[in-house]
């Protein structure tokens, strides 16, 4: 497109030289003919006794200039053709103007002036062939203007009337013929530039057509590759879902059996266990429960990653969900001697349109993390706050070890763990907060974490909510309005 724009008439960078061997050869031949004409002029003037010293010197210099320009054009294979044209234009114009002026004002030889004025025509043609149209027209008109000035000055000083003098007709006709040639050459130059523009446009269209065809072929290949990749991904997803369903059953069933038999042995339901047997049974039960928790977290994370889980929205009482989860976590907190505080400003009258299982999982993961990283005697607080805009905030805070500032931005990444030296026995997969983040996003909520190293951590989950008053509250409000109206 840049080449197309530069070839347009009146563009910023129009072409100045036609890169064609034929043009170069033609111009070089013109140089040689002009050189021969200058040589002929010397011999002709010498034989007619009109040769002067100035004529001979000027003609010899012109022959040298023409030969040098022809050699430069041939040796450079047209690369310096434009420079050669400029050189010949300057030297040839000065020579012709000098000869014409001397012929008219000194020798009063109009025929000699006419003979030399003919050579302005090939000079003008060379300008229009090799230079940009406006530049060629300007130089040609300037040269034409100088001839008119010389001729008019000669008529004025010699007192000649060109309309009545018989000798002035050829010179006037020749000058007018040059003007006609300049106009014609300008028109041909416009046509040439239009043809070049059209050719460039056609070439650009052909290139664009080929580029578009290549792009279309490449797009089709990419589409086929994308379809194949999608089919492969879908097959992999189905295989993973099948694997998760199978492993969920194959892992949980024996683990539950191990935990159940360990509890029977620990509590002496078959016989009174020995102290070591009771200790070993307790260790087996705890290890099985820990393993079951890890398996459940891994399966839940894989299920969320595969987008296979669905959010089932319904109206649920958050107070009931929180109370049920808190009772379960009280047992875990008591085993670790951690105080659990519950506080919320809503009751069973208010409901949230959400997924009950997802909210339970969020609460369980947040409270498990808080208890896990809170040392003995610490405090874990659970708050449920209803904002005026209808937003619900689930806030779980602790007085545990806290999180360093350089690790705070990564705690929600899958499998990332703090590895704090103050809690050497804390295990886990590092998926708790990652699962919380994904579940909150599925519920159109957000997760915020504030923590100070050595002081504790606070995690807030913001959920959009639809609060609903029960029928009795609604009826009370209606009765109050009716009483005011009455």
Image (tube, rainbow, N blue to C red):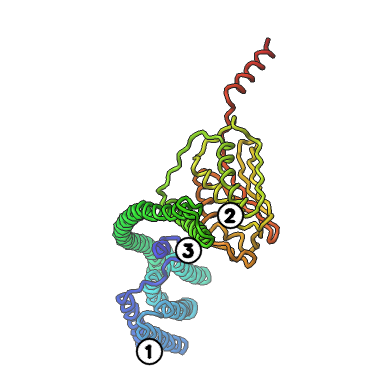
Q: Is residue 442 left or right of residue 319?
A: left
Q: Secondary structure at mark 3?
A: loop
Rendered view: 93 above or below 190: below
Mark 1 and mark 2 in contact? Answer it, CB < 8 Å: no
Determine which residue is flagged by label 2: 369
How busy is the neighbourhood of tag 3: few (under 14 within 10 Å), some, or many (20 plus)?
A: few
Gap between marks 3 and 1 measured at Cα: 51 Å
Gap between marks 3 and 2 measured at Cα: 70 Å
Mark 3 and mark 1 in contact? Answer it, CB < 8 Å: no
Determine which residue is flagged by label 3: 12
Nearer-N-terminus badge (1/2):
1
Determine which residue is flagged by label 1: 46
| The furthest residue to the top | 486
Which picture quadrant has residue 67? bottom left
Which picture quadrant has residue 89? bottom left
Q: Position of residue 63 (x, y in %)?
A: 39, 86
Q: Position of residue 51 (x, y in %)?
A: 41, 87
């Amino acid at each position: 497109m840049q080449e197309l724009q530069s070839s347009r008439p009146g563009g910023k960078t129009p072409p100045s030289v036609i890169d064609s061997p034929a043009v170069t050869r033609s111009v070089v031949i013109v140089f040689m003919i002009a050189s021969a004409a200058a040589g002929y002029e010397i011999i002709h003037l010498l034989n007619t006794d009109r040769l002067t010293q100035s004529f001979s010197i000027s003609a010899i210099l012109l022959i040298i200039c023409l030969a040098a320009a022809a050699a430069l054009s041939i040796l450079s294979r047209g690369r310096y053709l434009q420079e050669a044209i400029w050189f010949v234009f300057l030297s040839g114009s000065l020579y012709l103007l000098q000869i014409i002026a001397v012929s008219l004002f000194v020798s009063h030889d109009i025929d000699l002036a006419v003979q030399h004025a003919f050579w302005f025509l090939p000079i003008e043609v060379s300008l229009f062939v090799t230079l940009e149209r406006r530049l060629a027209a300007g130089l040609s008109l300037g040269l034409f203007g100088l001839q008119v000035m010389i001729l008019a000055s000669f008529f004025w000083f010699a007192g000649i009337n060109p309309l009545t003098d018989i000798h002035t007709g050829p010179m006037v006709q020749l000058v007018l013929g040059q003007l006609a040639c300049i106009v014609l050459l300008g028109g041909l130059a416009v046509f040439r530039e239009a043809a070049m523009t059209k050719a460039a446009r056609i070439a650009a269209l052909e290139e664009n057509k080929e580029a578009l065809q290549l792009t279309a072929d490449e797009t089709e290949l990419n589409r086929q590759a994308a379809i194949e990749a999608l089919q492969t991904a879908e097959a992999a997803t189905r295989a993973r879902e099948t694997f998760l369903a199978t492993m969920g059953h194959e892992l949980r069933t024996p683990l539950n059996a191990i935990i159940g038999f360990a509890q029977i042995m620990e509590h002496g339901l078959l016989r009174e266990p020995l102290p070591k047997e009771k200790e070993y049974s307790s260790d087996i039960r705890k290890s099985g429960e820990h393993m079951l928790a890890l398996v459940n977290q891994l399966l839940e994370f894989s299920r969320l990653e595969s987008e296979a889980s669905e959010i089932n929205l319904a109206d649920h009482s958050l107070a009931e969900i929180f109370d049920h989860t808190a009772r379960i976590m009280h047992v875990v907190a008591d085993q670790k001697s951690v105080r659990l505080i519950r506080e919320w400003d809503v009751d069973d009258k208010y409901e949230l349109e959400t997924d009950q299982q997802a909210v339970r999982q969020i609460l369980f993961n947040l409270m498990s993390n808080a208890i896990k990283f809170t040392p003995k005697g610490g405090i874990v607080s659970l708050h449920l706050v209803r904002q005026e805009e209808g937003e619900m905030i689930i806030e779980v805070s602790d007085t545990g070890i806290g999180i360093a500032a350089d690790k705070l931005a990564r705690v929600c990444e899958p499998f990332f763990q703090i590895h704090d030296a103050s809690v050497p026995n804390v295990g886990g997969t590092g998926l708790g907060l990652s699962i919380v983040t994904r579940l909150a996003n599925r519920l159109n909520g957000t997760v915020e974490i504030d923590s100070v190293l050595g002081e504790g951590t606070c995690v807030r989950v913001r959920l959009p909510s639809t609060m609903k008053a029960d029928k009795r509250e609604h009826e009370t409000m209606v009765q109050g309005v009716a009483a005011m109206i009455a």
